[in-house]
Image: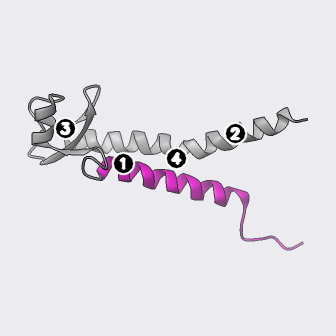
Amino acid sequence: HQSSWFKWWHAVFFFSGISILACLCQLFLPYPHGLMMTSTQIAEVGIAPGGCEGGLEKCICPRVTICATDTLSIILLALARCSAFFDYPLYMMMFLSKCHNIND
């Protein structure tokens, strides 16, 4: 029997890759299209009164509880959000597979 080069999990990884790309765009596009804001914008809004730290001109502060004002925080926030976004297609596949069983 001849096996195909395309496996079902290739599609899952494709959609997970699209999710990661959407996450990175959301994080690193400038405000209002993304979450990257200048230090003066963050200070004006009042989220982080000091603005960005460590000489950064731009940082990610969508709200007070999630405010990455230095390089390490931005990297860790990107890793955390990208790992969650990667899982979203997997959760949808699991949900759809369980919904399929309802019809039986």
As measured in the structure, the alpha-carbon distance from the residue carrying label 3 to the one carrying label 1 is 17 Å
For mark 3, what is the residue?
A: 69
Which of the colour schemes (rainbow, by chain, secondary structure, one colour) is used?
one colour
Q: Quadrant of residue 42?
A: top left
- Element at badge 3? loop
As measured in the structure, the alpha-carbon distance from the residue carrying label 3 to the one carrying label 4 is 24 Å
Q: Are marks 2 and 3 in contact (CB under 8 Å)?
A: no
Mark closest to the chain's N terminus, 4 or 2: 4
Q: Amino acid at mark 4?
A: Phe
For mark 2, what is the residue?
A: 94
Single out the residue that lies furthest toward the bottom.
2
Q: Is residue 16 left or right of residue 55?
A: right
Mark closest to the chain's N terminus, 3 or 1: 1
For mark 4, what is the residue?
A: 86
Mark closest to the chain's N terminus, 2 or 3: 3
Q: Is residue 67 magenta?
A: no
Q: Are marks 4 and 2 in contact (CB under 8 Å)?
A: no
Q: Nearer the viewer, residue 72 or 45?
A: 45
Mark 1 or 4: the one toward you: 1
As measured in the structure, the alpha-carbon distance from the residue carrying label 2 to the one carrying label 3 is 36 Å
Q: Position of residue 50 (x, y in %)?
A: 8, 32
Residue at horizontal 19%, vertical 40%?
70
As measured in the structure, the alpha-carbon distance from the residue carrying label 4 to the one carrying label 2 is 14 Å
